[in-house]
Amino acid sequence: MLTNVRNEIQYIMTALDMTEKDVNPKDPDSEAFLKRIADIRRFYKQTDRLLDLVARYTTDELIELLENDCR
């Protein structure tokens, strides 16, 4: 399942790259649009990083880590 989600993130990142290349810099809305793309890209990079961390543990290990951290 994590592999599928990570693949989806890669597809989204590729789509963001392609969209960014197609933005017309002369368009008055381009600056706001590029900022939004950067925000979305940052979110998906963080999500990918989180998935990388989660993938290092089993479900039981994650539950134990999170429960112990809450105490």
Image (cartoon, rainbow, N blue to C red):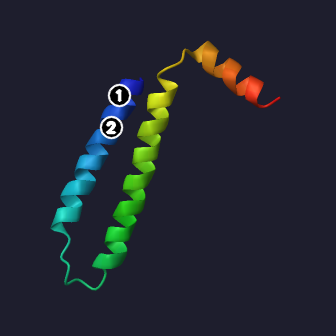
- The C terminus lies in which quarter of the figure? top right
In the image, is 1 to the left or to the right of 19? Answer: right
Residue lying at 32% horizontally and 77% vertically, measured from the top left: 31
Q: Residues within 10 Å of mark 1 (few under 14, many from 20)?
A: few
Q: Amino acid at mark 1?
A: Asn
Q: Residues within 10 Å of mark 2 (few under 14, many from 20)?
A: few
Counting from the top left corner in percent of width and height, residue 25 is at 20, 79
Outermost residue toward the right in this view: 71
In the structure shown, which secondary structural element does the residue marked by tag 1 occupy?
helix
Place of residue 1 in the rendered image (x, y in percent of width and height, measured from the top left): 41, 23
71 lies above or below 44: above
Q: Position of residue 11 (x, y in %)?
A: 26, 42
Tell me where residue 61 appears, x and y as whole percent: 62, 15
Is 5 positioned to the left or the right of 60 in the image?
A: left
Q: Which label sits on residue 8?
A: 2
* Numbered disc 2: secondary structure: helix
Q: Is residue 53 left or right of residue 4?
A: right
Q: Are marks 1 and 2 in contact (CB under 8 Å)?
A: yes
Residue 64 versus residue 33 in the image, above or below: above
Q: Compared to 48, does 52 lie above or below?
A: above
- The residue beneath circle 1 is 4
In the displayed structure, 58 sits above or below 21; it is above
Q: Nearer the viewer, residue 16 or 68?
A: 68
Q: What amino acid is at disc 2?
A: Glu
